[in-house]
Image (cartoon, helix red, strand yellow):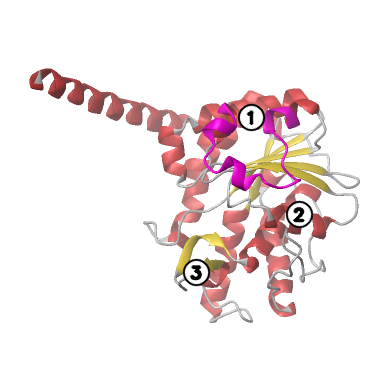
Amino acid sequence: MRYLLALLAIAAVAALLYWRHAHRAGAAQDAGADVQALYQAERVLPGGPLRVYHLGHSLVGRDMPAMLAQLAGQGHDHALQLGWGAALREHFQGPQAVNGFAQENATPRHREAHEALASGDYDAFVMTEMVRLQDAIRYKESRLHAGKWAAEAAAGNPDGQIFLYESWHALDDQPDWLARLPDDLERLWKPDLLWPAARAAGKPVWLIPAGQVMARLVVEAEAKGGIAELKSREDLFARNPDGSLDTIHPNDLGVYLVALTHYAVLYGQSPVGLPHALLRADGTPAEAPSPELARRMQELVWEVVSAEPLTGL
C-alpha cells in the first residue's frame, strides 16, 4: 500500500512538473502574432459617458470605481462583482466559488457578472486576475478564463470594448517589486491574459497599465527624494490596524492613481486638471493628494497610457 501511494505521489509530481513545463513553453511561444492584426484598426473612443462593468477583487474594490465615476462626471455609470482574492475562474464558476462573495458584493453596485454581460448594457468591460498572478496562471487556468470572459463580453455587446486591468504584486514579493513590474507585463500579463482574451473575443482587448503607471511614479519619487508628500513606494499602500504596512492594497493615494489610469484609458482623454479631492464609495472623503502631487500623478498617467500602444491611444 505504501509503495502504491508512493508511486501515485511520484506520478502526481511528475504530472505537475510536466504541466508546468508545457504551460511555460506555451506561454513563451505565445507572442500574440495571430492577434496583432486586431490592434491595427484605430480604436473608437467614446463620445460621451460610459457604462462600465468591473470584475475582480480588492485591487478593484468599491472605492476605485467610485472615484472613476467622479472623475468621469455626470452620466458615467458602473456595476461590479468582487471577491476575496478571486480568480477569473472562480467568478466564471459562480457566486458559490467566490470567497467573500456576499460581503464584497453587499452594495447596490453589484450585478451578477454573467447576467450583466449577457444584458449588453455595458460599453466597457474591465477584468483583472487574482494576485499572485503566477499562481493564477499556474493553478487557476487564467488563459482559458480570460478568454471565456472576453468572449462572453463580446457576444453580449459586439460594439462594447474589453479591457484588462494590469495590477501589481506585493511589495515584499521577490524579485524586487519595482524591477519586476515591467517584466511581469511582458512575461505574464500579455501572453497569459491579453493575447488569449483577444483571441477568444475576436477583437482587441485593451490594456489598463496601472502597474506600469505605479512603477513610473515610484521611480520618479524615489529618485527625486519625493514628489510633494509621496516619498517612496510605501506611501501608495495602506496600513493594517496595528500600523504595519499592507504590502498589496493601495491607500487612497494609490486608489486615486489607479482611478486616473482607468479614466485615461477608458475615455482616451488626459486626466490633467481633473479633481483630486474625491469621496470613497461610502461617501466619506478620501485622503486627497496635495495639488502638486495630484498634478504630477495626472501628467504621468497620461505620459504612460498615451505611449503604450495596447491602450489604443
Left or right, 305 with respect to 90, comes to: right
Residue drawn at x 59%, y 36% is 194
Instruction: Give me the disc on residue 241.
Output: 3
Task: Identify the element where label 3 is drawn.
Answer: loop
Can you tell which of label 3 and label 1 is closer to the viewer? 3
- The residue that disc 2 covers is 263
Instruction: Count neighbours of disc 1 (C-alpha within 10 A) and say few if under 14, some if 14 to 19, many if 20 or more.
Output: many
The range drawn in magenta is 93-116
Left or right, 65 with respect to 148, comes to: right
Instruction: Count neighbours of disc 3 (C-alpha within 10 A) and say few if under 14, some if 14 to 19, many if 20 or more.
Output: few
Task: Identify the element where label 1 is drawn.
Answer: helix
Q: Where residue 262 sits: x, y (%)?
A: 71, 52
Instruction: Count neighbours of disc 2 (C-alpha within 10 A) and say few if under 14, some if 14 to 19, many if 20 or more.
Output: many
Pick the residue in front: 103 or 177.
Answer: 103
Residue drawn at x 91%, y 47% is 48
Instruction: Give me the disc on residue 149.
Output: 1
Per the model, the C-alpha gap separating discs 3 and 1 is 36 Å
Task: Identify the element where label 2 is drawn.
Answer: helix
Q: Does the magenta stretch include residue 249?
A: no
Q: Where residue 86 sits: x, y (%)?
A: 53, 41
Q: Quadrant of the N terminus?
A: top left
In the depicted structure, whether residue 243 falls above or below residue 271: below
First in sequence, mark 3 or 1: give its number. 1
Can you tell which of label 3 and label 2 is closer to the viewer? 3
Q: Can residue 76 be seen? A: yes
